[in-house]
Image: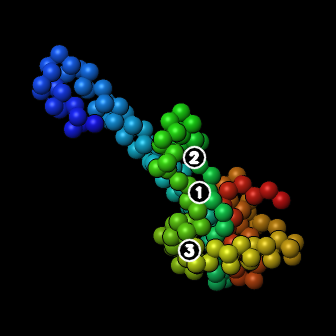
Amino acid sequence: MVIIAIPIMHFAPRLKYAALIPVIASLAFSAQLGNTMKAQQEYEDFVFNMIAQDIANHKNIVSIGTVGQLNANERAKLIIENKPLVGHFVFPATEFLASFQLINKGLLQTQHGYSDVQENKNKLANMISKGIKPVSSNQYYSLFISDNTAIVFLGKYNN
């Protein structure tokens, strides 16, 4: 858009202010996208700090798996509802990204989410079928622990 605006401003001076409209629109979109991505990142950092703290309170955890997808930040949801194009660039963390975020928080026993997605879902299903309840549950995540294995269900868990 900027490439189009520069020649218009040079060759048609009367239209120079109209030529700035695409520039202003692209800057506004960029600012909204940046704000949305930052809000989502801060939200995810907050949630993964809580998860790391919960897991750190339980000793002898040998394996940590992740299942599900984190909810979107409320601020990000509002921007995405008003500007749907922003939603194509902002994605809440899923199993794959969550596993790396937990490793970055110091939980090195976390399994990589990419190859272990179905295995983690099966482990969670087995825990639930055995009647194991989450040791910690809130609107962001639920933490299930059984036999030194922790499974983090991202998002709101409904019994």
Residue designated by label 1: 47
Question: Dividing the picture into quarters, in which one does residue 107 lie?
Answer: bottom right
Residue at 66 percent of width and 67 percent of height: 67
Residue drawn at the location 74% of the way across and 70% of the way down? 144
> How far across and down, in percent of the image, does residue 97 sit?
53, 65
Q: Nearer the viewer, mark 1 or mark 3?
A: 3
Q: Which residue matches tag 2?
A: 73
Categorize mark 2 by other alpha carbons within 10 Å: few (<14), some (14-19), many (20+). some
Amino acid at the residue labelled 3: Tyr
Which one is in front, 115 or 73?
Answer: 115
Tell me: 27 left or right of 66: left
- Kind of element beneath mark 3: loop
In depth, the one of 109 and 125 nearer the eye is: 125
Residue depicted at x 55% and y 59%: 93
Q: What element does badge 1 sit on?
A: helix
- Vertical arrangement, residue 1 with respect to residue 131, above or below: above
Q: Amino acid at mark 1?
A: Val
Residue behind mark 3: 114
Residue depicted at 12% across the width and 25% down the height: 11
